[in-house]
Image (cartoon, rainbow, N blue to C red):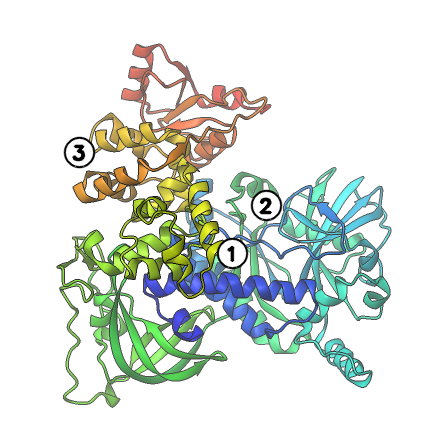
Amino acid sequence: MTADTAVDALDEKSAQQELARLAEVLLQANRDYHTDDAPRLDDATYDALKRRNTAIEERFPDLKRVDSPSNQVGAPLAEGFSKITHAVPMLSLSNAFDAEDVADFDARVRKYLGLDADSPLAYTAEPKIDGLSLSLRYEDGALVHAATRGDGTTGENVTANARTIDDIPTVIKGAPKLLEVRGEVYMSHADFEALNARQSERGGKSFANPRNAAAGSLRQLDSSITKSRPLRFFAYAWGAVSEPLATTQMGAIERLETLGFVTNPLTKKCTSAAELLAHYKDIEERRATLGYDIDGVVYKVDDLALQERLGFRSTTPRWATAHKFAAELAWTWLTDIDIQVGRTGALSPVARLQPVTVGGVVVSNATLHNEDYIKGLDSKGNEIRGGKDIRVGDWVQVYRAGDVIPKVADVDLSKRKEDAPVFVFPTQCPECDSDAIREPGDAVRRCSGGIICPAQAVEKLKHFVARGAFDIDGLGSKQVEQFHADGWIAEPADIFTLRKRYGSGLQQLKNREGWGEKSANNLFDAIEDKRTIPLDRVIFALGIRHVGEAASSLIAMHYETWDAFETAMAEAKEQTGAAWDDLLAVDGVGAVMAGSLVNTFAQEAERASIDRLIAQLNVQPVKRPETQGSPVAGKTVVFTGTLEKMTRAEAKARAERLGAKVSGSVSAKTDILVAGPGAGSKARKAADLGIETLDEDGWLALIADA
């Protein structure tokens, strides 16, 4: 399978394989780029791979790996540099690819803040510079150190090199006592061309692109080399500060400019999503004339107090997003439609195409999403593409969303053959011939074979041993496929009985290609090491539909032990009652995810398989974090009624940050009820149980100093 095929095919099996390949390729590319200053991938290829990885994860969130490039905010630290821990982490940004994504971003921000569509809300929009992020720390106006983004938490100390860049002042006047200025080191197109010309003249190596040249130049162990390179710096953000720069993002940028930093003149304040898109279009049209590389436009909520309220997800702020430049289109012939079966049984149609270049990448496969999409319908039965269906032999338009994942976007009916047959989506699984069922409200048809379906069995096993799950050294996708094909493993529990069933296992394993006595011993030892494993990893490893890595962690923290979790799933089987309500109270768990959890445990075959696995393990409990100094750490809090000073989502998020457990129902385990206007049965029940009840002001007073 070629790299393009793996990337372009959007079924779960190929997506998982591609994510594994991308993790390896991008890690090596980062080493080449940052550590050896000798990139083997050009800038466009690197960016396309990184964006492709992100888009696949967005489409298949359950397949996201622990070593995912999207979890790696920056890059591995190079040897030779001392380390600096960022006082405030340097995080990455979420991405938007079209106007709809921008509208969704605006809607999410407004919903979190409790603002309606007509409420005033300002943003800033600025070019996204394609360079190397740098943090500059000033104390009493003097530059004391400079650090690269690194992994987002710790960066390389490049202070001596940063001092050689003309755009970076070493002393500033009128600044706060402590100020961390953040921005992007870059190289202009003209300077890049001149640098490569000089490199060629002296027999040195040429750089692949301005970004690589800037990064390699800044990260030199010899600062005299950096000084000889034409580096520039745009300031656009800040980290730790002893006092606020301003009350708005725009005001802070203007303050940085008065302090002597170069800021981007295309940064603009906008008052609506429509204005953001208009400025995006303007920057896009001027892109070729800017003289430096940009790859999109960054939008940020302008009011810094609102930024504080919005806060952060695990690796990205809620108050900002990067709008990447538009996708590219191409037309080609659709030669076939294949149906592939994923880990959850989903039947995914994949378009096989006559190869065509789209955005610098040769595309030979594209997604067709589901059977409705092929028919020319959306998930609600409304016509798309003017109701045109898609058939084998059609002349189709291929669209690469955000220069990442190709999909078939349109059909030219004028080129369709008169006898082209309508595509009939299968109602039986192509792998095991079980019925392929489409449940009401589900856009996807799924194989009902479960563990008897070889496609599902292998993919579930691959997921089980993946990063974020059991992550067993020496047992990856390739080995899982081999062992399954040979009948060694059929379900996860079989992994932990390999040594017992095959004696030492050495004779059978060491004679296989790629295995020796040492590697065989190492594998069995690695399996033994993973018998003891935290609850959250076990839940994620089960591969339950809709239950991703983040949700697994939240669920594990809620129930703490396997026994409690298992008992709760059994008690919630009928999807009613206290156990069901308690499950729904877990942050991020909705009815669909909860139903998937309890249904998995209710299926006899699945439950038996899980029981056999747990019998082999020592599942470690997960304890809720203790928050020192928090008056609500370890307490169970319920919110009811209407909150007037913050939204329910904001209140819940803050309580959990302070170490509280937020529940959706009142019980004897509840410690505090926060009741706003309109509180009803929950307030009465809390009173009956003698539970402490606070109004919103009382709650805010309680946590004011935490």
State the quadrant of the N terminus.
bottom left
What's the residue at 43%, 42% (across, down)?
Answer: 528
Q: Can I make out residue 131 in this image?
A: no
Q: What residue type is labelled 2?
A: Asp
Of the residues tagged 2 and 1, which is closer to the observer? 1
Name the residue type under label 3: Glu
Measured Cα–Cα span from mark 3 to mark 1: 38 Å
Mark before the other along the chain sequence, 3 or 1: 1
| 237 with respect to 560 (left or right) | right
Residue 183 lies, in percent from the top left, at 69, 57
Percent x, y for residue 131?
A: 66, 65
Label 3, secondary structure: give it: loop
Residue 11 location in percent, x, y? 32, 65
Circles 3, 2 touching at the beta carbon (< 8 Å): no
Looking at the image, is mark 3 or mark 2 earlier in the sequence? 2
Q: What element carries label 1?
A: loop
Q: Mark 2 points at which residue?
A: 303
As drawn, 177 above or below 679: below
- Distance Cα–Cα, label 3 vs label 2: 47 Å
- In this figure, which residue is indicated by the disc labeled 3? 574
Left or right: where does residue 680 sit relative to residue 106? left
**Mark earlier in primary sequence (2, 1):** 1
Q: In which quarter of the image is the C terminus?
A: top right
Q: In which quarter of the image is residue 520?
A: bottom left
Q: Which mark is residue 70?
A: 1
> In the image, is residue 408 above or below residue 126?
below
Q: Position of residue 397 (x, y in %)?
A: 34, 80
Quarter holding residue 435: bottom left
